[in-house]
Image (spheres, grey):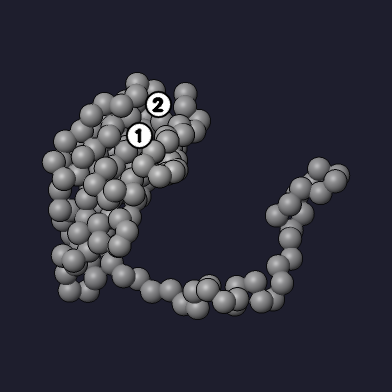
Amino acid sequence: MQIGSDGKVQPVTFPSDAATGPGLPKSIRSVCTLLHNEVVCAVAISNPVRHIYTGGKGCVKVWDLQLTQTGGVLKTPLYTLDCLGDNYIRSCKLLPDGRTLIVGGETNTLYLWDLAAVSAWTLIRRTCLRLEFSTREELVELLLLRVV
């Protein structure tokens, strides 16, 4: 959709080969079902893909895809990171080091988790609905977007 010069929303026509170019997936398949058992508001995936981090009410569940059971189902997380009480996790991002997870949500605390030690530090006292980071050499910049 696009907004025309008259201010009205108009459909956009894509070329017929838009989804068939080089480097685009030709099919999709389910790899695993994670039984989180509550609403999931944020997801982070390790690279290479082994661990999945799902944020819901008050915690992040850490899943290990190597423990997938018959039928491609994971019923129990590897462990749970409790951090926001009864508030919802709205964002979780795994840093490129693969061992640091940043978690934010509907509270005035942003957590920085050391996954190797399974310990957390309080980083910022602001509500965080979304966060992004970029790396340049060894510097990691946090850009807190839509901080209330």
Task: For label 2, count other residues whose C-alpha is less than 10 Å away and answer few (under 14), some (14-19) or many (20+).
Answer: some
Q: Amino acid at mark 1?
A: Gly
Secondary-structure class at tag 2: loop
Residue at 13% across / 41% down in the picture? 117
Give the percent coordinates (x, y) of residue 122: 26, 26
Quarter that holds the N terminus: bottom right
Image quadrant in which you'd find residue 64:
bottom left
Left or right for 128, reference 81:
right
Task: For label 1, count other residues whose C-alpha is less than 10 Å away and answer few (under 14), some (14-19) or many (20+).
Answer: many
Could one spot residue 35 in this view of the protein?
no
Q: Is 28 located above or below residue 9 in the figure?
A: below
Give the percent coordinates (x, y) of residue 12: 74, 60
Image quadrant in which you'd find residue 111:
top left
Residue at 16% across / 69% down in the picture? 69
Mark 1 or mark 2, which is nearer the start of the sequence? 1
- Return the mark for residue 104: 1
Could one spot residue 60 in this view of the protein?
yes
Give the percent coordinates (x, y) of residue 11: 74, 58
Q: Is 30 located above or below residue 148 in the figure?
A: below
- Front-lying residue, 13 or 44: 44
Q: Are marks 2 and 1 in contact (CB under 8 Å)?
A: yes
* Residue position for label 2: 127
Residue at 81% across / 43% down in the picture? 7
Residue at 41% across / 31% down in the picture? 128
Give the percent coordinates (x, y) of residue 30: 35, 71
